[in-house]
Amino acid sequence: MAWQFSSEDSETALGSRDDFVAALHQQFGAPIDEFAARVLYTEAVANAVRHAPGPIRIVLEARDDGHWLCVFDEGPPFDWVPELPVDLYGEGGRGMFLIDRYSDCVAVERLPAGGNAVRIKLNPGPPAPLEPE
């Protein structure tokens, strides 16, 4: 599954979050942590919209090791620093921190033709409730 937007069309890009979550359920039948999936999509796409002018491509991949949200942009290189920002209410750095906390793994790659690929492994669904003994 893939979606493509211009970074100038943030409303459509962020508005496709529900389509992304529906695709997780429908296409892959994946048990997912839906809250975490929504946070990851929102933060990754918002970062691309804010920092990478041009097209943004969002891909949902099913691999043997799980489900991955991949965001491709044509923006400048950046360092992946998922630390809690000093100003908790500021705009800088919070997205990377949330992505790091709500995902199983994050890989950031500079693409040979320019731009970035941010690959985020989604958490599986919430654990089953404990049965009373």
Image: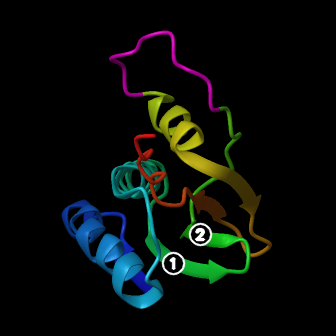
Q: Is disc 2 in contact with disc 1, using a CB cutoff of under 8 Å?
A: yes
Residue that badge 2 annotates: 68
Residue that badge 1 annotates: 60
Give me the C-alpha separation between circle 2 and circle 1: 6 Å
Q: Is 1 in front, or is 6?
A: 1
Determine which quarter of the picture holds residue 5: bottom left
| Label located before the other in sequence (2 or 1) | 1
Q: Label 1 sits on what residue type?
A: Leu
Looking at the image, residue 58 lies above or below residue 77: below
Residue sitting at x 44%, y 63%: 32
Q: Is 73 in front, or is 118?
A: 118
Q: Is residue 120 magenta?
A: no
Q: Position of residue 103 (x, y in %)?
A: 57, 49
Callout 2: 10 Å neighbours few (<14), some, many (20+)? many
**Relative horizontal placement of residue 110, taking residue 102 as reference (left or right):** right
Determine which quarter of the picture holds residue 100: top right
Q: Main SS type for the magenta part?
A: loop
| Residue interval drawn in magenta | 82-91
The secondary structure type at the circle numbered 2 is strand
Q: Please identify the residue farthest to the top as the structure is shown.
A: 86
